[in-house]
Amino acid sequence: MKAIVAGATGLVGKEMVRLMLQRPEIEMVYALSRSPQSENQPGLTWITGKMPPESLPQADLLVMALGTTMAKAGSKAAFWKTDVELPLQLEKLAREAGCKTLLIVSAAGANPKSLIFYNKAKGTLEEESAKMNFEKITIIRPSLLLGKREENRPAEKWAQKILGPIRNWLPASLRPAKAEEVAGTLLSAEGNERVRIIENQDIFSIYSGQFFLNFGIKGIVKNK
């Protein structure tokens, strides 16, 4: 089995790559990054440079974990390009190369009709991705993500400091999720429906079951 991870240097994307490299059924992980990467190890190939590339290699699974902030993007138009347009371009290339399964890291509150721009962007990506004709699509909608980022996000850092220590006392629908929980849940999720949405409160019950330790991602992607 081969997989592509878009957003491989991000908080959840890095966890996705780490988990995939531990799975014996995955022979290759193609990790996408605009900037050059020095990390090399068996089973991992970096695709770097201009995004989107002209084409993507054949893979069974595409993980869409791209995401930025309004502050880093600099404008709504730039944010939309990074969080909506680029993912859709990559999904199209993956489908053209024969990819059948799509996993998307979205966000709580995603809704294409939302008056909140961030939620509208995430909802639009979900809606348009569903039209891409993948055989299976799993979308996860985490709330605040916990973990150490390479980039500086002051507001998120303060939220982590405040909510992190008390997260177990918060309602599951509002509880911050660790990057490893999001990645593990998304990789382990199974379902009969073509499009499955995992809300924030579902992350903890799925992850605590540790299904991914028993089944890996064989349940969501069948070898040809």
Image (cartoon, rainbow, N blue to C red):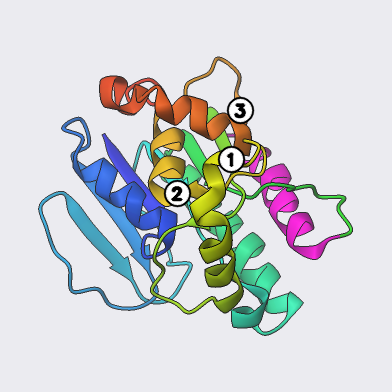
Sequence-wise first label, 1 or 2: 1
- Residue on which disc 1 sits: 169
Residue nearest the viewer, comparing 159 with 199 = 159
On the picture, is 125 further left or further right than 68?
Answer: right
Q: Secondary structure at mark 2?
A: strand
Q: Amino acid at mark 2?
A: Lys
- Residue on which disc 3 sits: 196
Callout 2 crowding tier (Cα within 10 Å): few <14, some 14–19, many ≥20: many
Residue nearest the viewer, comparing 99 with 140 = 140
Q: Secondary structure at mark 1?
A: helix
Q: In the rendered structure, which segment of residues is drawn in magenta? A: 116-134
* Image quadrant where residue 138 sits: top right
**Picture coordinates of residue 97 (x, y %)?**
41, 45
Callout 3 crowding tier (Cα within 10 Å): few <14, some 14–19, many ≥20: some
**Discs 1/3, front:** 1
| Residue located at (59% from left, 65% from top) | 159
**Picture coordinates of residue 91 (x, y %)?**
53, 50
Q: Mark 1 to mark 2: distance in Å?
A: 15 Å
- Residue on which disc 2 sits: 178
Sequence-wise first label, 3 or 2: 2
